[in-house]
Amino acid sequence: MSAYPSVSVIGAGAWGTALACVAARAGRSVTLYARNPAHAAQIQAARINPRLADIRLDSAIDVTSDIAAAARADIVLAATPAQHVRAAVSHLAPHVRHGTPVIACAKGIEHGTHRFMTEVIAEAAPRATPAILSGPSFADDVARGLPTAVTLAAGNESLAASLVQALGSSTFRPYHTTDVRGVEIGGAAKNVLAIAAGIVVGRNLGASALAALTTRGFSELARFGRACGARAETLSGLSGLGDLLLSCSTAQSRNFALGIALGRGEAAPAGKLAEGAFTAPVLVELAASQKVDMPVSQAVAAILGNRLTIDAAIEGLLTRPFKAEE
């Protein structure tokens, strides 16, 4: 048996529920925390979360609104959206034991502070040990047990390896690394680039333009990652290129869907705002501080901020000076 027999998931949305299924499939005893007591009671009684309506919860999953009970687990997965991670972890912090791994499962950069997710966890819960889970995955696929590979990063190699052993199964394969920043950058930047890819599709610019956008987008993601100390193999792996390719190729991606709507001149899709919309301005500011050129991300941030039309952005990208590959 793993050194981590119990797992809590903070956040009972579709992604949190899918991760609870992952932990149960890996043989863990699972607590799924929902902030709203009525929502928690409904899921516990029905064994189905309306946000993932086709999935029946395993008997190993207990659903609660008691944060203290959730904090008693050996591993905590923070599965709230990136902009809510600080509040969720702050709520958890008084109850968590010293050294408990708290794994961020959101892809983004905190608005206002420019903090990456493990930095948010370290500030909000100083007794916890931060880690990050990211990679190409969709909640419905993961919950159904379809084959999925992701990346899990922690500052300590032994910890990262043991967390992978605790969460991995025959259908959910995490690869471990100590390149925490590389995983965070890959996950956050790809959300912005997926919006750009959606704009290309929504504007009917063609498959060649989409391929060019994806290639150039990954190139700037890699430049930014290297400037921040990320390792090349992380950025070219599951948490970088793999995540980007998935998000730029399917309407299941909320960021890609937002881009398609923008490209067509339509209103943003109903529901939660895509993470990339929050990340874009922060990413551009961080890139400027590192003197890294990220023209695609800059264009997305300007479009979202209503400072640039899509046509002007396309013209600006196409008329940039010719240059050597970096």
Image (cartoon, grey):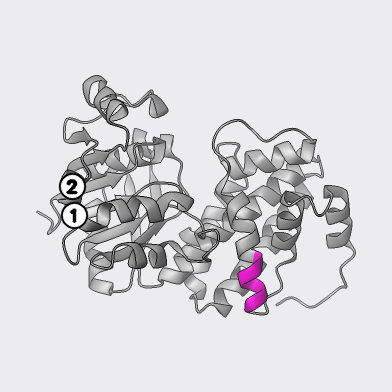
Q: Is residue 310 left or right of residue 247?
A: right
Q: Position of residue 73 (x, y in %)?
A: 16, 51
Is residue 314 at least partly visible in the picture? yes
Residue in the foreground of this view, choosing between 310 and 25? 310
Residue type at mark 1: give it. Answer: His
Quarter containing the C terminus: bottom right
Q: Are marks 2 and 1 in contact (CB under 8 Å)?
A: yes
Residue, far left: 1
Which residue is the site of mark 1? Answer: 95
Q: Residue at 64% across / 72% down in the picture?
A: 287
Q: Is residue 34 left or right of residue 278?
A: left
Residue in the foreground of this view, choosing between 158 and 313? 313
Q: Residue at 30% across / 37% down in the picture?
A: 34
Residue in the foreground of this view, choosing between 296 and 120? 120
Cα separation, mark 2 vs mark 1, equals: 6 Å
Q: Position of residue 254 (x, y in %)?
A: 57, 40
- Which label number is shown at residue 68? 2
Relative to 29, say whether 101 is above or below: below
Looking at the rendering, the stretch of residues picked out in magenta corresponds to 284-289
Tell me the element at label 1.
helix
Tell me the element at label 2.
helix
Residue type at mark 2: give it. Answer: Ala
